[in-house]
Image: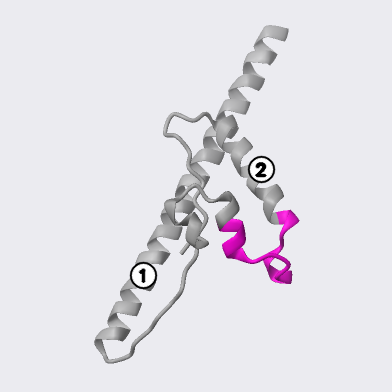
Amino acid sequence: VALVQVALEGLRANQSAKKAEEDAHKKAEVDAARARAMAKRLAEDASFGKVAQAKAQHILLKVSETASFEQIEKKLIGWKAILEDAPYHNQEHDFGELAKAHSECPSAVRGGN
């Protein structure tokens, strides 16, 4: 009975991890679709003589395709701690400075631009 219980708990944990990974993947797809829609709208506005400009900064967190759920979770927890230490809504820290310090993208040296 104990072995069955352990197996069930392991299965539930695995299912929970898979669900979390699927949810993260779906969120990434939704975010990408929103970005494409916004780019399309900006392109349409520009085609009617309306010039729209936007400045975007980003922080890239690289994750290997072979990374385990635990590795991804550890990286996200670390990033969450950074965000909680430097809340943007209080503007205590400049986003560009955070990008320089933490982004894994070549644009990090330019503050994520």
Type of the residue with mark 2 = Gly
* Residue drawn at the location 72% of the way across and 8% of the way down: 2
Q: What residue sits 67% from the left and 66% below the top? A: 88
Q: Position of residue 67 (x, y in %)?
A: 49, 30
Q: Is residue 88 in view from this perspective?
A: yes
Does the rendering let one see residue 1?
A: no
Left or right for 92, reference 56:
right
Q: Quadrant of residue 87?
A: bottom right
Labels 2, 1: front one: 2
Find disc 1 in the rendering and name its residue. 37
Mark 1 secondary-structure assignment: helix
**In the image: residue 100, left or right of residue 50:** right
Give residue 65's quadrant in the image: top left
Check disc 2: other Cα within 10 Å, few if <14, some if 14-19, many if 20+.
Answer: few
> Which element carries disc 2, helix, strand or loop?
helix
Residue 24 location, x and y as percent? Answer: 51, 46
**Tag 2 residue:** 78
x 53%, y 51%: residue: 103
Task: Point out the stretch of residues depicted in magenta.
Answer: 84-99
Q: Is residue 73 above or below residue 24?
A: above
- Residue 39 left/right relative to 106: left
Magenta stretch containing residue 88, yes or no? yes
In space, the residues marked 2 and 1 are separated at their CA atoms by: 31 Å
Tell me the amino acid under the disc marked 1.
Answer: Ala
Q: Position of residue 85 (x, y in %)?
A: 75, 55
